[in-house]
Amino acid sequence: MNHASEWSNDIDTREPLDIDPFDDLPEIGEMDLAERQALRRVAGLSTELQDVTEVEYRQLRLERVVLVGVWTSGTAVDAENSLLELKLLAETAGSEVLEGVIQRRQKPDTATYIGSGKAQELADIVSATGADTVVCDGELSPGQLRQLEEVVKVKVIDRTMLILDIFAQHAKSREGKAQVELAQLNYLLPRLRGWGGNLSRQVGGRAAGGVGMGGRGPGETKIELDRRRIRERMAKLRRQITEMTTARETKRARRLEREVPAVAIAGYTNAGKSSLLNRLTSAGVLVEDALFATLDPTVRRAHTPEGRLFTLADTVGFVRHLPHQLVEAFRSTLEEIGDADLILHVVDGSHPDPESQLAAVREVVADIEGARDIPEIVVINKADVADPVVLAQLTAREKHTVVVSARTGAGIGELMALIERELPRFDQEVRLLVPYQRGDLISRAHKEGEVLGLEHTGDGTILHARVLPSLFAELERTAKPVETV
């Protein structure tokens, strides 16, 4: 009994309170709304070390960054692909990606790009990961950059600044460096900021905090001095680029005088343009699995299977939302596309979204004077690692396509045959008797035209060839028609 009484005292015999433990949980609709408005983490964006020996180097050299994007249109896959491309850009610039998040909004917030609440969440992510830089997937206004930096307490850069930094690292030639510096200064000019009253020189009297007479500055603030110097430097760079453009135009005019057909290779960055140029001409151009590895244009001679001479020009790669400052600065380089007779549009067949690459390149090419009406061959590269279904879809959707692999050489013969058919015909077919003392004309026919046949006679060489108008005019003055011999 004693034990029973002890048990009865331990048992709570009071009536249970009318409380549902699930009352505080949100409704299903509220949960869906919170999920839609939350920052979405994108898996697989952290930079993984390939070698243990990289650890010390990365700690000393690489910036630790967090990526953030605003998803305004399209599908979630499109938004994640855009952030994956931003990851590649950040790694190309020399940084270690720690985290990537996306905010779903109708349009970017005018103050902090992702909104004040999500900016505070981003600050918590930055603090937790130990990042020292935030990279935004878009072009931010000066006000957005400043206010977002005030919340996250680390450096904030946008997509445009990141691409300009990559261009600055990879520019090698004098013209390329000048073009990149001009684009950087053009971007920096409206984003100069003053840091308090220490930059002000327009003070005096009581307004000078008691300094009085003699405390007035030269009348121009430090930020105004910086802006003026930037404008002077931009004007000097434009003059230098104009002078360097003259040399490029001279070379181009020389090719036009010889009436050699020109083919321009255009395409998305890292699509394999330089690899294709090396495969077609043995140009020896730098090939690297990185974005914007080569910036300086390269022009090389090539011959079709029938022996026709033409030039191949490798141009700078494009990317989604290519900064307009770069398009303006590299206008002289992009003119190689506008002056071409045929465009080889190279696309990466192994990319998750090759259609968007095609659209991004065509958007920029359409702004180049004279490029809209130039015939185009879509070259689907990296066939050795691409999905056959994707290749079939691209081939069915695009006209004048050819599937190749610049690495293995597959499809190169078919590409050269297609170039042969699409190149304009400047030449004329001749059958003339060339005197032996004018062997230089036979040599020019081999170099500049297409020799169909040679027959040596007692009076000279019977030349049967297709030649350009300039050589045709000289042959008419020197050689004799075969029929009159």
Image: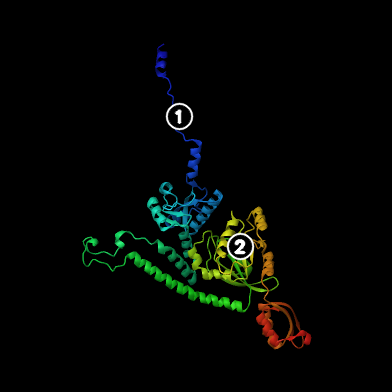
Quadrant position of residue 355: bottom right
Disc 2 to disc 1, how far (Cα)? 61 Å
Residue 470 percent across, percent down from the top left? 65, 81
Q: Residue at x 63, y 55 (%)?
A: 386
Residue 84 lies, with reference to residue 345, above or below; the image says above
Element marked by disc 1:
loop
Q: Residue 275: where, in percent of width, then height?
A: 59, 64
- Nearer to us of marks 2 and 1 is 1
**470 with respect to 99 (left or right):** right
On residue 346, the disc is 2
Quadrant in the picture for residue 306? bottom right
Which part of the image, by quadrant, shows the C terminus? bottom right
**Residue 200 against residue 259 in the figure, above or below:** above
Give, as a three-letter code, the residue at label 1. Pro
The N terminus sits in image quarter: top left
Say which residue label 1 marks. Answer: 21
Q: Report helix, strand or loop for mark 2.
A: strand
Compared with residue 439, is residue 56 higher up or lower down, i.e. above or below? above
Q: How many marks?
A: 2
The x, y position of residue 111, in whole percent, is: 41, 52
Q: Can you say whether 374 is above or below 148 in the image?
A: below
Inspect the image, locate mark 2, and give the three-letter code of the amino acid beneath it.
Answer: Val
Q: Earlier in the sequence, mark 2 or mark 1?
A: 1
Judge whether residue 202 can be spotted in this image: yes
